[in-house]
Amino acid sequence: MAEIGCDQFSNCLIDFVDGDLDQVQHALVKDHLEKCPLCEALMESYVKTIFILQKVNQVAPPKDMAIRLRQYLQSKLPSSL
Ligand SMILES: [Zn+2]
């Protein structure tokens, strides 16, 4: 099976959490999560942020929030990847 890198992971993260990935992509993201503690930590902080936002707003966060958050998460990744 092919593997994805951290940059692809961060691109897929939001769709992964939303359940919008197809089976193959979902498996690739899960596979990467198991191998990469950095992305696992990113995933956890993303899920926590979404959870807090949902508690505060009682609604799903707007899409531009998700995009900004993804840019933030990407800035946390090592640029060499
Ligand atoms: Zn990674």
Image: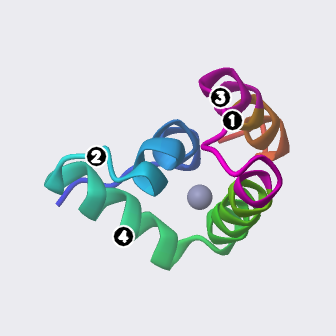
Disc 1 residue type? Arg
Disc on res. 31 = 4
In whole angstroms, how far apart are the C-alphas of marks 1 and 3? Answer: 13 Å
Which secondary structure lies at badge 1? Answer: helix
In whole angstroms, how far apart are the C-alphas of marks 2 and 4? Answer: 14 Å
The residue that disc 1 covers is 70
Residues at badges 1 and 3 in contact (C-beta under 8 Å)? no
The residue that disc 3 covers is 62
Disc on res. 21 = 2
In whole angstroms, how far apart are the C-alphas of marks 1 and 2? Answer: 16 Å
Residues at badges 2 and 4 in contact (C-beta under 8 Å)? no
Residue, x 28% and y 46% (percent of image)? 21
Q: Quadrant of the N terminus?
A: bottom left
Disc on res. 28 = none
Q: Nearer the viewer, mark 2 or mark 4?
A: 2
Residue, x 64% and y 45% (percent of image)? 59
Which residues fall within the magenta stretch? Answer: 53-68
Residue 62 is a magenta residue: yes
Residues at badges 1 and 2 in contact (C-beta under 8 Å)? no
